[in-house]
């Protein structure tokens, strides 16, 4: 790649595309060089391209393939693992202008969209036709369906309704060779060949560029959810409550944990007046039809109490319940208001090990002298410890990175995974290698090599 | 492979394994040479091996890899596409003795089993702990979890609860090189690397040999299901009713179609006294908690009536309802009692095209002069036209094969897939090639080549 003259590539890209697709202004390009992962490295790009159609994406890949120039695809850049970070000499391909909703079909319960459609925009469009797109990452107001598919994004609903992979029926992709292919199907079921769609979901742009997404939809929920709130004196007690709810066969439609630090940050930012005295708050929501919802809410409440909740109640006020879930969604930006750098963890544990893992995280924070705030998709065992450090404090930063590694090690030791929903990107590559082991890594690399033999698609990410 | 001396391979296999694992008696071997796909070709095997452990499977693959001898893995042999059929000079690897249930874990809602565990056996074991394994192919009393995973088996429940792929969390596999690998996870979520588990599910033994399966379980259902029965004067009217129920946002937990011919066959065999005057019967079941179930049943009934049902009713008698679902499950063996050869179709259509596809099938049967009985997982758009021909009637057989091809063509033309749940095996290879097109086939082959470079795992199946 060292022999490529960027000017030649730029000229070819400009020739191959309609006007105003290729951006080279340094300030503009700079704003596309990385996602929201703190401290993940990134290089400089020779250009940012913003195609509007599949044919334009294919044209970009065609040029880049010819010159073996790396392509880094990117949605809204809300990733937290560095998956969308530029690599030196690359072309950043932003899907932000591919925002067409092509079909919402109630009879087939599916939607067809370009990859740049924002998650919440799709959800709203589906709702207009009585349909529901469940995957709801906290980034839903900004993140795109293409990015969600590339990272197999999760969210609050997945504890009952599954992650992005569970909703992707078909994809149109541009391969590493610049070929446009349609994989998957529009039917409810299908087993014609290997599951290439499932392979593409979560591959973080390393196996192909997604140019159209067909997702399954559900009928819109019509029930009024019931929310159960529990306050716990320790994070570990809250973890125990989660294990108990699962073991009791209960199926909340959202099941979240917020620690005191996050609640305080939301209160400080939004003057929300949330109860922030307890170490941790659990929020469980049931969406069964009544009276089953009331029974499930009672059963959840009983498990909270059995796990030693200092207080537990059903929230009968929907406004109050929504305020609590908003606090969960706002935890990340609220912590950002503190003006500190934030390293986001994403370990996912077997639910029985949740309390133990939380205790380990607390201990790691003390030992490494790092402030750790925690939110969690508790029902999934998916923890997001947020490691905070003052900007410019190099020593604090080193301590936070050490704590990050300790948390990864603990998760692996307890039978968990290093990333539940954020993706591998750059930050989780070492952890993934330890989690999977050499044999499975070799299998991953064989797949990458088969589908991107010249390693031009987001090189150096996921499998390197 | 032509230079391999079978005796050398047999000697090595016998050396590598404990006693009584290698079977070579011709009569015994013959009983392992094919699955239940009528008219799919099969070759002779040099031996059948019945390993009992992962290490034994790895030993078999090691020997076969060294001599480049094809390995055809096999569960119970209930497949309907020829996927388990022997290829000339192969070793058939039967998992029938790998029947250990290793773990059923209520707190994690998962089970870990060897591949030879029978589907219904797992379901019963899970139920003992208040848990439910949903995928329920009609072969559930005989077929194995390993075979279900290899084919991504469906069943009656998948209309609401998903197919086998939706339940597989982790696999232990033996690779084409004889290496034992663990892929996937025990956590609710995880995105560490490409979805190799999803890739393996439905790969019909062509990418690796499954030696252990970890499946997700659900809490056991405690509701008493309600059944709605509708009788229709034409198959197409029944197809229309299915589209209406879906478009109305209803979510039956089973939604099946049985035509008159199947009902008559079950009556003739079991003296079941089922109502067999109408062209088609639709059976829908709701498992919501009451009173939501009653409301959903009423809504389904209203759609049946709107679609022109000659009669529609809620079955208030659980015994009667169960008898109707038994008729659905017994359709296949009941037709076998007629003493005819039966070619089983498995096309899956967009639900809006169901009525049209059913009309096409009726027309194809008339045009080709072939008796076609039809059962369907109607709610999924998954049709199983069963093509019946007298044994030994070569002309009838040719007509049936032509009708089979016509049905495949019609399904592709209407935007469907050639196989909804039975798999590609041998019978659907031509259809799959037409459905996917050359570009996607090449992508499939690249994956196969990457993971089985010497083409020893079930060669000639799925992607050839």
Image (cartoon, coloured by chain):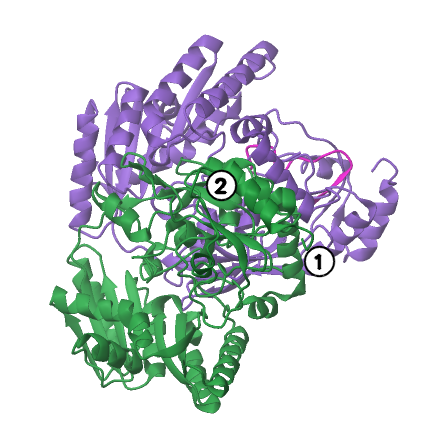
Chain colours: A purple, B green
**Could you tell me what secondary structure mostly forms the magenta stretch?**
loop
Left or right side of A315 for B113: right
Q: Depth check: A112 or B114 in front?
A: B114
Q: Which percent across, then down, holds residue A181?
A: 64, 60
Q: Residue at image x 43%, y 45%? A: A136
- Left or right: B125 in relation to B183: left
Instruction: Check residue B63 for magenta coloring.
Output: no
Q: Position of residue A82 (x, y in %)?
A: 61, 33
Q: Does any portion of residue B420 appear in the rendered image?
A: yes
Answer few, some or many: residues within 10 Å of disc 2's Cα (few below 14, many 20 plus, some between 14 and 19).
many
Q: Which residue is mark 1?
A: A179
Asked whether residue A20 appears in the rendered view, the answer is no
Extent of the magenta region: A78-93
Residue under pointer 2: B57
Q: Position of residue B53 (x, y in %)?
A: 43, 38
Residue under mark 1: which chain is it in?
A
């Amino acid at each position: 790649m060292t022999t490529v003259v960027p000017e030649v590539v730029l000229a070819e890209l400009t020739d191959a595309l309609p006007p105003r697709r290729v951006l080279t202004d340094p300030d503009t390009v700079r704003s596309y060089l990385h996602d929201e992962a703190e401290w993940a490295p990134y290089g400089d790009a020779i250009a940012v391209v913003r195609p509007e159609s599949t044919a334009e994406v294919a044209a970009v890949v065609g040029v880049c393939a010819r010159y073996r120039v790396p392509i880094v695809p990117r949605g809204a850049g809300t990733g937290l693992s560095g998956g969308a970070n530029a690599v030196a000499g690359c072309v950043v391909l932003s899907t932000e202008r591919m925002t067409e909703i092509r079909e919402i079909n109630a009879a087939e319960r599916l939607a067809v969209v370009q990859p740049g459609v924002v998650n919440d925009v799709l959800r709203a469009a589906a709702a207009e036709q009585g349909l529901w797109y469940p995957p709801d990452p906290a980034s839903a107001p900004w993140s795109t369906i293409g990015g969600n598919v590339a990272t197999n994004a999760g969210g609050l609903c997945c504890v009952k309704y599954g992650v992005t992979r569970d909703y992707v029926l078909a994809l149109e992709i541009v391969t590493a060779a610049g070929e446009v292919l349609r994989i998957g199907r529009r039917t409810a079921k299908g087993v014609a060949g290997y599951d290439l769609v499932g392979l593409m979901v979560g591959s973080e742009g390393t196996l192909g560029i997604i140019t159209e997404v067909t997702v399954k939809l559900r009928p819109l929920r019509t029930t009024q959810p019931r929310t159960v709130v529990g306050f716990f004196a320790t994070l570990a007690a809250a973890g125990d409550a989660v294990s108990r709810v699962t073991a009791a066969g209960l199926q909340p439609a959202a099941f979240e944990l917020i620690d005191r630090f996050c609640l305080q940050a939301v209160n400080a930012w939004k003057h929300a007046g949330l109860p922030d005295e307890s170490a941790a708050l659990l929020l469980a929501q049931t969406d069964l039809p009544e009276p089953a919802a009331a029974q499930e809410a009672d059963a959840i409440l009983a498990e909270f109490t059995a796990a030693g909740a200092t207080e537990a109640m059903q929230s009968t006020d929907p406004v109050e319940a929504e305020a609590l879930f908003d606090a969960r969604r706002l935890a990340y930006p609220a912590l950002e208001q503190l003006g500190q750098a934030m390293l986001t963890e994403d370990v996912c544990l077997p639910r029985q090990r949740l309390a133990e893992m939380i205790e380990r995280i607390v201990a790691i924070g003390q030992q490494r002298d790092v402030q750790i705030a925690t939110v969690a998709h508790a029902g999934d065992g998916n923890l997001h410890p947020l490691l905070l450090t003052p900007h410019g404090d190099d020593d604090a930063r080193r301590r936070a990175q050490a704590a990050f590694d300790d948390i990864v090690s603990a998760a692996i030791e307890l039978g968990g995974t290093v990333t539940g929903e954020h993706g591998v990107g750059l930050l989780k590559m070492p952890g993934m290698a330890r989690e999977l082991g050499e044999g499975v890594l070799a299998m991953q690399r064989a797949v990458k090599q088969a589908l991107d033999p010249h390693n031009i698609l987001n090189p150096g990410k996921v499998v390197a």
